[in-house]
Amino acid sequence: MLWVVAMALFAANGVVAQEAAFVARYAESESVTGVETAYLLSIATGLASPGDPFDAQTVQESAPQRVRDLVTQDPLTLGEFSFLLTTYFEITDGLMGRLFPGPRYALRDLRRERVLFFRADAGSPVPGETALRTIRRAAALEASS
Amino acid sequence: MRRVRMIVLGGILVFSGVSAIGLEVDGIFSAGAAAAGETGTEGSVLLPASNALTMTQRFTEDAVIILQGSAALETSFDPVSSDWSFSVDRFSFEDTINRNAGWVFSYTVGRAGFADYAGILNPLTADGIVLAFKRPTLQITGLASTTALLQPGEFPNLTLADSAVAADDDRIFGLPRLLGNAGVFLPERWGRANVGIEYLYQTDLAAALEATDDSLSSGYLTIFATHPLGSRLFGFLAATGSHGSYEDGANEATTLLGGHLVAAMRGFGSGPLRPSGSLRLQAASGGASDASLPDDPGGTDTAFYGDQIASVWTAAPVGLRNVVAATAEGRLTPTDWLTFAGTSTLLAKPALGDAGIDHLLPETRGVYGLELGTTLEIKPFGDLDFDFAGSIFLPLQSGIGVFDGNAERSWSISATATLLW
């Protein structure tokens, strides 16, 4: 079931054929990691091609400088996940987030933009299915703006 | 003494927010200037500033403890004075049960805000328990709480005893009241109509627990409905009946029996300016009383006493009593960060009593006057906005006007900046 949801989320970006297994594994994870999330965000935002294979080192080296420290194999907190999203999709809704970029204000920006509905604190892990749904809403927000 | 205790309390709030682990801490800073007055006189100027800190500790997806405290500084001129105040606006445990099974039960214990289904009350804060049950086409809510732990003035002053306590710096808590509310809301139960009924009751415990004979108890039954009137037009109707009794200790109790009505339409246009507008009729019953408190010992006062209900006029010296107000509002939003609105409110006086308003002709019915207002909202960022507002009331002094020749135009202006940090 999760696999079907994940495929639907990324079908528009051409991920289905090449990276189906990766997306399905991501959707079923209890806590997403920085490097896996950055890989999906790279494809979702067009920074990488759907056909590019997953390579952790490449993903980390190509990540925007300000979030590079988060692009590791470690699980992301909700705040860190939000910071990755706002960085890749360039969601900069708030003044505080521009002055002090980081997980704290990224999380607020996503909630204010109604991208994030996950009821958890900033330090909570992010389940894969929640992460995919949130990435889809961020992509929809970017498309509408 | 009260100030010292409140400062200590505020310090504890801030310290606990900074030191605790796992809390989310959100701040709202607001600062601005407000001035009000009458033509021919020097107006009063206030510089209010406040900062609210909200700490949220989540235990599960639905169970959460929320603590919100605020500090406010208000500087006034002529003479220059500054007044600090600290308050606990919210301290509650909230949980939701069975969110994904077709029905939801939630409860809140502690100090929390209460909102009515009809949305005609100003925010109401008290300490107690709120229960809510929701299904797609049925919502039921119940509230049992007290104002005994609120500071003086945090709940509206309903009696002279309330006003006396609010002016007493040695008082930590205001006069105690019990609040109860029960409501049923039926969203789209019949077509696209939303229908609801709710009852709010407050009983005054001051006479029983304090050295005062002054007490006012009252209940409010509201029936309301909303319904689309077209693809871009929505209608709202809410009727409230109030009852209660007032005693001042020296005379027989006065029975209260009043009414309040709101009928409104709001429409949304299309186009680059994103226009919207509304027409609103708001009426509150009056009586033969000539004071702001009931004064018909042994009799019945038909004036409406509902100080928690919001009104749209700000400069007119007219309370929500003995009034019929017709408001037209227009709003333009040319960009996401800019909104301009203008309002015009005609206020009429349906009953003879003057409800404590100065410069009224005695024993008259007619038109109070016209209030014109405008607001400008600038929101350059999602967490920062600037609000500017101004309004002027033009009293009608001849013909069908109810004011004598000494009434002056009253006005108010304000500018406020708010930052979520």
Image (spheres, rainbow, N blue to C red):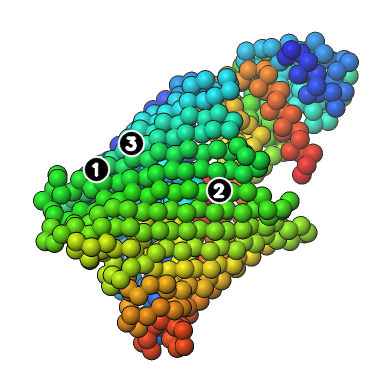
Task: Name the spot of residue A69 as percent of width and height, x first.
Answer: 64, 24
**Which label sits in the foreground, 3 or 1?**
3
Dot 2 falls on a residue whose secondary structure is: strand
Q: Residue at x 44, y 43 (%)?
A: B198
Subunit of label 2: B
Residue type, mark 2 in image? Ala
Task: Name the spot of residue B340 as percent of width and height, x first.
Answer: 63, 64
Determine the image quadrant of residue A82.
Answer: top right
- Examine the rendered structure and indicate whether residue B319 appears above or below residue A65: below
Disc sitting over residue B144 in the figure: 3
**Which label sits in the foreground, 2 or 3?**
2
Disc sitting over residue B148 in the figure: 1
Q: Residue at x 67, y 23 (%)?
A: A131
Subunit of label 3: B
Distance from label 2 to label 3 (Cα)? Answer: 25 Å
Task: Name the spot of residue B311 as percent of width and height, x first.
Answer: 46, 61
Which of the two labelled residues, at mark 2 and mark 3, occupies the earlier sequence position?
3
